[in-house]
Image (cartoon, rainbow, N blue to C red):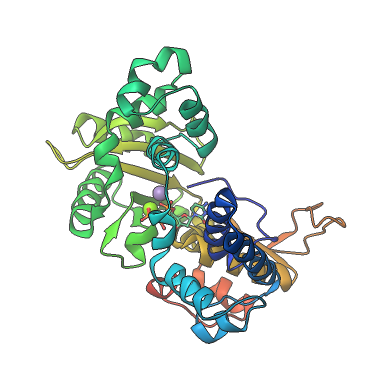
Amino acid sequence: LEEPQEESSENPNQYIIDKLKELRSIYQSKQGDTDTFKVFNLNKVIGDLSRVKHKITTRAQALKLNGSGAKTADKIMEIIQTGGLQRIQAEDTEEYRVCKMFAGIYDVGAKRAHKWYNMGLRTLEDVEARKDEIGLTRNQAIGLRYYNDLQERIPRAEASAIFDKIREAAMKIDGNITLYIMGSYRRGEQTVGDIDLLLTRDPTDGITHAGMLHKLLDTLHDQGLLTDDLVIPPHNKALEQKYMGIGRLPPDGKLRRIDILAIPYDQKGAALIYFTGDDLFNRSIRLLAHKKGYSLNQRGLYGGVMRDTKRKKMTEGVIVASKTEKEIFDVLGVPWREPHERRR
Ligand code: DCP
Ligand code: MG
Ligand code: MN
């Protein structure tokens, strides 16, 4: 869950490019004759991939890329199908493994992980022992404490049970609250990385959900469902608020990441699209909106956006659609796609 970004320059094949670049850096670090040749070919494929506008989904498309052959096409298909490459895993070094482990700590990025590695840290115990020296933040310390639980994906049934408990608590605060479970769960996946919730309320009776998210958080802490807060929204009457925290199925379930996004009711459609994802679908639909002269973010579809020569927005434009997902798809001329069809 992140702030809306300018994503007009994103490429629908970026995740393939990222993996091929990882592979390229492995070849580059070896520097044998055949590796030099492989780097040369990979450069061509990566270059071509950054230029094609359509999403690559089939082997035939992968084969057509400049610099591509049977082996490259196989690798591209493996990335499309598994999100990874065995070849990269087989080549990995101690540094790669340690940094990957460190970067698995909540709020630790690749750069910080490498910094710690270069300071001689090798294990999670090292991180704990030298936490003052490395300036471990409060949230990173939480991530470290729950490291093993937070590495795991959540079975769908457990996510559903946690959602039921949260919805029950919300209904006790106000029976007219609308609460949806979003992200990978809404896309129908069997396991989810975290629990993403969308909270809003139809204000036609004159009542909004202002202040209700905080009431809900208090209840959930009292119940022991929430254990730690990572990002707490300000105590104000804003209708758009973001919470990030850690919780469990009481009394002793595994610790899980929980995100709650509160949004104004009239932005429900745009928020549903954003928070359903997946991130790649969001990139491509935003790119499409941009091509048609609109701008799409989690708050709505905007028309009449003025951009400078660097495509940077000069004016926000006016909202064209935001209330329902269907309305936004229709304006964009995109055939309806069920949530489970919005994934790579
Ligand atoms: N999202 C996005 N861009 C990001 C992060 C998130 O568009 N950089 C949107 C699309 C995601 C949704 O928010 O589907 C939820 O974000 P998550 O990180 O929770 O991702 P998912 O729920 O899709 O997957 P996971 O099962 O890993 O949580
Ligand atoms: Mg999620
Ligand atoms: Mn999330």
Name the outermost residue toward the top.
Answer: 132
| Residue 222 showing in the rendered view | yes
Residue 113 pos. (x, y %): 47, 33
Task: In the rendered view, tell whether residue 184 sits above or below residue 123.
Answer: below
Q: What's the residue at 24%, 40% (across, down)?
A: 149
Quarter location, residue 90: bottom left
Q: Residue furthest front?
A: 33
Q: Is residue 208 visible?
A: no
Residue 119 in the image: above or below residue 169: above
- Residue closer to the observer: 124 or 137: 124
Instruction: Looking at this view, name the residue that lies furthest to the bottom.
Output: 60
Camera-nearest residue between 213 and 20? 20
Q: Is residue 90 above or below residue 71?
A: above
Q: Quadrant of residue 39?
A: bottom right
Q: Position of residue 56 (x, y in %)?
A: 55, 77
Q: Residue furthest right?
A: 309
Q: Quadrant of the C terminus?
A: bottom left
Residue at image location 30% in from the left, 23% down from the top: 125
Residue 325, position in %: x, y? 50, 69
Left or right, residue 287 beside residue 235 = right
